[in-house]
Image (cartoon, rainbow, N blue to C red):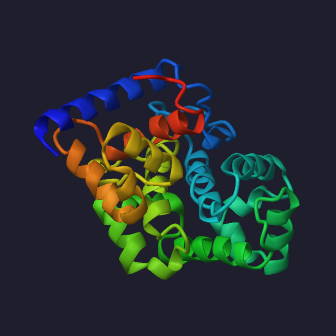
């Protein structure tokens, strides 16, 4: 792909990003906007209590591990109901989770349908909570341990403690989760430009429409190859690949109502 074509694709990417910010892509309410008191998409600038910070990190981590082949909007609506229910909020407290029995956790996670699979989903949730509690004590200390570096976070989750982070350690959800914790969770990470775009159906459709890949490549290339294509395209553009995810996702999901 020559430089002239690359420049045009990047220019179109900027147009889509601007349209997203201006509300020209249609409905752009993110699934994760269903959250308690921490509704801003930007990292917080004011002081928050240690308890609030910890709950915030747990809230934007644990439900993510159950976000597989299901409606993301319904998942996060269920997470919000679970958090707002005094009887079930404890599932966002890793210390409390380690003391609760499996049946107690199952009852709490299924009450508002955060968990749809009463065995696998409960095991996934408890495993991540146990990993955080046993190795770091809290989510806040876990993120302190990565020293604000995405590459260290990636090593801890994808390699050093991979089995302790079921599903989140998978490449697609890990990169998207990293985006969510920086966008919603208030976590600031260096090397954020290494967070890969997650090529689901919508991102793939946009990739073809923009000319990042061809229709034939959309069928033949694996997700990692598509992510690499985006990284190479945006390498000197000043755009982090993952920041293209929401604009592209909504552009496709809403039927490409914005025309370039």
Q: Is residue 125 above or below residue 182?
A: below
Q: Position of residue 105 (x, y in %)?
A: 79, 71
Q: Is residue 230 above or below residue 159?
A: above
Look at the image and tell me whether residue 130 can be seen: yes
Task: Identify the residue at image location x=27%, y=53%.
Answer: 229
The answer to which of 76 and 182 lies nearer the viewer is 76
Query: In this view, which residue lies farthest toward the left?
Result: 3
Left/right of residue 141 with respect to residue 216 in the rendered view: right
Q: Quadrant of the C terminus?
A: top left
Q: In terms of image quadrants, where is residue 109?
A: bottom right
Q: Position of residue 154 (x, y in %)?
A: 35, 65
The answer to which of 103 and 221 lies nearer the viewer is 221
Q: Is residue 182 above or below residue 42?
A: below
The answer to which of 206 and 143 lies nearer the viewer is 206
Task: Identify the residue at image location x=60%, y=65%.
Answer: 65
Left/right of residue 180 with respect to residue 67 in the rendered view: left
The answer to which of 205 and 158 lies nearer the viewer is 205
Q: Position of residue 221 (x, y in %)?
A: 36, 63
Task: Identify the residue at image location x=66%, y=36%.
Answer: 37
């Amino acid at each position: 792909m020559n430089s002239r074509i690359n420049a045009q694709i990047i220019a179109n990417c900027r147009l889509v990003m601007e349209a997203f910010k201006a509300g020209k892509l249609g409905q752009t309410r993110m699934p994760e906007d269903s959250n308690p008191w921490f509704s801003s998409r930007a990292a917080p600038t004011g002081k928050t209590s240690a308890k609030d910070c910890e709950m915030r990190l747990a809230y934007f981590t644990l439900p993510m591990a159950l976000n597989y082949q299901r409606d993301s909007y319904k998942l996060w609506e269920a997470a919000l109901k679970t958090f707002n229910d005094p009887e079930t909020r404890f599932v966002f407290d890793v210390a409390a989770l380690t003391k609760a029995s499996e049946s107690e956790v199952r009852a709490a996670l299924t009450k508002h349908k955060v968990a749809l699979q009463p065995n696998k989903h409960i095991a996934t949730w408890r495993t991540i909570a146990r990993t955080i509690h046993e190795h770091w004590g809290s989510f806040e200390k876990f993120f302190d341990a990565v020293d604000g570096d995405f590459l260290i976070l990636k090593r801890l989750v994808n390699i050093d403690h991979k089995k302790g982070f079921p599903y989140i350690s998978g490449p697609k959800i890990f990169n998207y989760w990293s985006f969510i914790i920086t966008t919603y969770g208030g976590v600031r990470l260096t090397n954020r430009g290494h967070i890969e775009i997650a090529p689901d159906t919508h991102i793939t459709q946009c990739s073809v429409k923009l000319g990042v890949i061809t229709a034939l490549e959309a069928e033949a290339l694996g997700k990692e190859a598509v992510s690499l294509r985006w990284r190479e395209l945006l390498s000197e553009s000043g755009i982090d690949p993952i920041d293209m995810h929401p604009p592209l996702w909504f552009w496709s999901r809403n039927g490409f109502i914005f025309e370039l």
